[in-house]
Amino acid sequence: MKTILLIRHAKSSWDHPGMDDADRPLNERGKKDAPEMARRLKEKGIRIGLFVSSPAKRAKKTAKYFAEAYGLEKDAIVLIEALYHAPPSVFAETIAALPGEHSTVAIFAHNPGITEFASSLTDVRIDNMPTCSVFAVSADAGSWEDFMKGDKKFLFFDYPKNPQH
């Protein structure tokens, strides 16, 4: 069994319009939401073996907050250039290449690709993954190469303003 946690980066700042998109930092709400969402994941008893992120500053920082909540060093985050504004196909390629020893992996990336990919995995459709939302899916697969072919099961969808939390 393999589980993927798709996590959209937390809310980013638009305070500097001329700033390169990849360099945009988290805003105050993002800095509050990321540790909160990491705490919620931990409360669910989810053990994350690997953190994979787009190299964009806002995605990397979101991943760092999650890694810290799990007691891991920020060096534990694997940066994958292709995840920056990736289409759904890149998510599938990234998952297929994950190291086999991990059964649960968190991937931090961007819209619209992350929403499109999440909606393609099961019958559950998400119109838009809000910032810092988490979409969890498991697959009956013995390896990451088989994740996309395996029978997939929607586990949960959570986001900072979720009224059920």
Image (cartoon, rainbow, N blue to C red):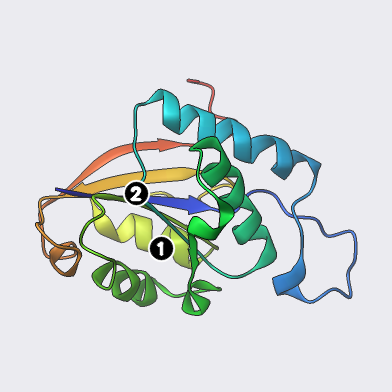
Residue on which the image places disc 1: 116
Q: Is residue 74 above or below residue 112?
A: above
Q: Position of residue 37 (x, y in %)?
A: 54, 35
Q: Amino acid at mark 2?
A: Gly
Name the residue nearer the viewer: 122 or 37. Answer: 37
For the question of whether residue 70 can be seen, the reply is yes
Helix or strand or loop: what does disc 2 sit on?
loop
Q: Is residue 66 left or right of residue 61?
A: left
Residue on which the image places disc 2: 49
Q: Residues within 10 Å of mark 1 (few under 14, many from 20)?
A: some
Q: Residues within 10 Å of mark 2 (few under 14, many from 20)?
A: some
Q: Quadrant of residue 161?
A: top right
Q: Amino acid at mark 1?
A: Glu
Name the residue nearer the viewer: 143 or 14. Answer: 143
Which residue is at a point 48% across and 73% down the rendered structure image?
80
Which residue is at a point 54% across and 36% down the rendered structure image?
69
